[in-house]
Amino acid sequence: MKLYLRKILLSSGMLAVVIYLLHILLGGYLWKTYSHLQQPISDLTATGAPNRSLLLLFTNTYGVMALIFAVAFTFFEGRKRHKLVFWGGVSFILLHVISISYSFFPQDFPGAEPTFAGSMHLVVTVLIVPFTILTPLLIGFGLKKEKEWKALGNFSLICGILIIIFGGLAGFFFAKGLPYFGLVERINIGTLQIWTFVMSYKLVKSKHEEH
């Protein structure tokens, strides 16, 4: 029973990613003039955005599931692996605790006057950045110290490096108002989502093999 519960909690990472992807696809489909290449993902739940209430159900569920995975990862894996994995897990938890606050501070609708909530949305984004970078890097360095998990550790480090590169590019594109910001942002956020899904899958698979 304990192993079964552990697998369910660790599976929440994969479920979170699927829900996040669905919110992007559904939001883009319902908002006929929305551009995945040009607009940020957060436009889909911005103040005044069409279908905002519906899509918030997805993003709020994603936030809860991702946080459950982060806590489960830290509790089950952080205690028995290198201390860097534990601190990476702590960073992972903080990332999603802060991320949940996006629901309280929606982005301003494109072209609308700046609001306090919209400004706080940017502040939340700035706060999330260091934890988004630290999480895969710390966990990657920690896992590399174990032969069995070295490959996953290398994968985690690669994801961390890609997040640094495309996160920096996304910030540059946003600041300069360059076209295809949406594409660059999706590569950046997509890397984190792929990392989350793979970590969740590998951990669930390892628990199945142990059983």
Image (cartoon, rainbow, N blue to C red):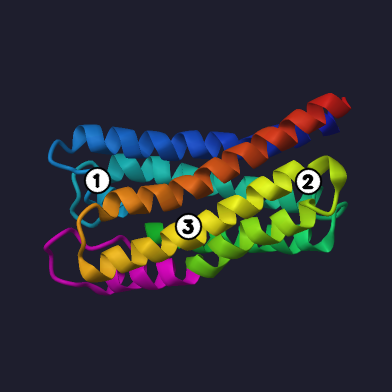
Give the Cα separation between the discs numbered 3 and 2.
31 Å
Query: Residue 37's mark?
Result: 1
Dot 1 or dot 3, earlier in sequence: 1
Near-viewer residue (168 or 70)? 168
Question: Circle 2 sits on which residue?
Answer: 150
Callout 2 secondary element: helix
Q: Amino acid at mark 2?
A: Lys
Give the Cα separation between the discs numbered 2 and 1.
35 Å
Compared with residue 191, is residue 205 higher up or lower down, i.e. above or below?
above
Q: Nearer the viewer, mark 3 or mark 2?
A: 2
The answer to whether residue 179 is left or right of residue 183 is: left
Residue under the point 72% across and 49% down: 153
Is 126 contained in the magenta span?
yes
Residue 181: give x, y in percent of width and height.
Answer: 27, 55
Is the residue marked by circle 1 packed among few (<14), some (14-19), or many (20+) residues within 10 Å?
A: some
Q: Which residues are magenta?
A: 105-127
Res 124 visible: yes
Question: Circle 3 sits on which residue?
Answer: 100
Residue 193: give x, y in percent of width and height.
Answer: 51, 44
The answer to whether residue 128 is left or right of residue 152 is: left
Residue under the point 56% across and 63% down: 133
Check if mark 1's residue and mark 3's residue have beta carbons within 8 Å. no
Query: Residue 2's mark?
Result: none
Task: State the image quarter where residue 112 is shown.
Answer: bottom left
Is 151 contained in the magenta span?
no
Q: Nearer the viewer, mark 1 or mark 3?
A: 1
Compared with residue 13, is residue 156 higher up or lower down, i.e. above or below?
below
In what quadrant of the picture does the C terminus appear? top right
Give the Cα separation between the discs numbered 1 and 3.
25 Å
Task: State the image quarter where residue 1 is shown.
Answer: top right
